[in-house]
Amino acid sequence: MQQLTNHSMELVVCIVNPNEADRVIELARKKGIEGGTVFYGEGTSSKGVLAALGLDTVRKEVVLLIAPEEQATEALDYIAFKKKMHVKNKGIGFRLSLSQVLGIYTGSIQEKTQQIEEREYKRMYQGIFAIVNKGEAEDVMDLAQEAGAQGGTIIQARGSGSKEAKRIFNMDIVPEKEMILIISEESQVEQIVQKISREQDINEPNKGIVFVVDLNETRGIQ
């Protein structure tokens, strides 16, 4: 039976250059996070929409890590420092809260008794996720840019077989779909979402899904 953890869990997402995902997972392991998931992303650099996020190059690797909040914070700090995410084109990272996590065993994680300095991060950015039919991702990116977005990443989440589906955020992502991740300032999110929804007919059946999540912390945003 899968275990539902009661810890405050977070998802750490790192978008890095090709062949660097293993290094990110290695750095996370040094902070006590065992394992991770890697997806392959494509930017739309030919449209020039990734420059502001420092993601001008096309190929990217997307690393997903799950850990308790304190551990996730420490790991992201460490990864950002080691990967020099303050430098353009060195990648970006962010954390977001998870309401439920299944299959993560946390019994070996000891609670720290030493009081640490409380850290607060203003939620200045939000993540916009759009899942659309294959071949429509660049159109979505263009619409987002018209509405004020500065960049994004197209995530290819393919199964190893044509009938295999990947599950991301409790949604089936089959080979005929593409997922776009856009990081935007909160003040611009609503107009971006409305633009995509209206122009792509998202409310029509089988046209796509768009959802927004709060980002607890971001690194590498230029």
Image (cartoon, rainbow, N blue to C red):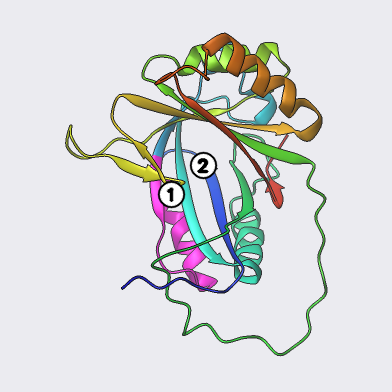
Magenta extent:
19-39
Does residue 214 show up? Answer: yes
Callouts 1 and 2 close, C-beta under 8 Å: yes
**Residue at image x 52%, y 12%?**
200
Q: 142 and 166: which one is in front?
A: 166
Residue 23 forms part of the magenta stretch: yes
Residue 102 to residue 157: above or below: below
Tell me the quadrant of the picture where the C terminus can be found. top right
Q: 94 and 173: which one is in front?
A: 173
Give the amino acid at mark 1. Answer: Ala
Give the amino acid at mark 2. Answer: Val
Residue of label 2: 16
Q: Position of residue 183 (x, y in %)?
A: 65, 34
Residue 98 to residue 34: above or below: above
**Residue at image x 66%, y 30%?**
53
Query: Circle 1 sits in a helix, a strand or a loop, which is it?
Result: helix
**Residue at image x 45%, y 59%?**
25
Left or right: residue 76 compared with residue 206: right
Q: Position of residue 139 (x, y in %)?
A: 51, 11
Query: Circle 2 sits in a helix, a strand or a loop, which is it?
Result: strand
Does residue 19 show up? Answer: no
Q: Quadrant of residue 119?
A: bottom right
Residue of label 1: 21
Task: Decide which of tag 1 and tag 2 comes sooner along the chain.
Answer: 2
Q: Quadrant of residue 89?
A: top right
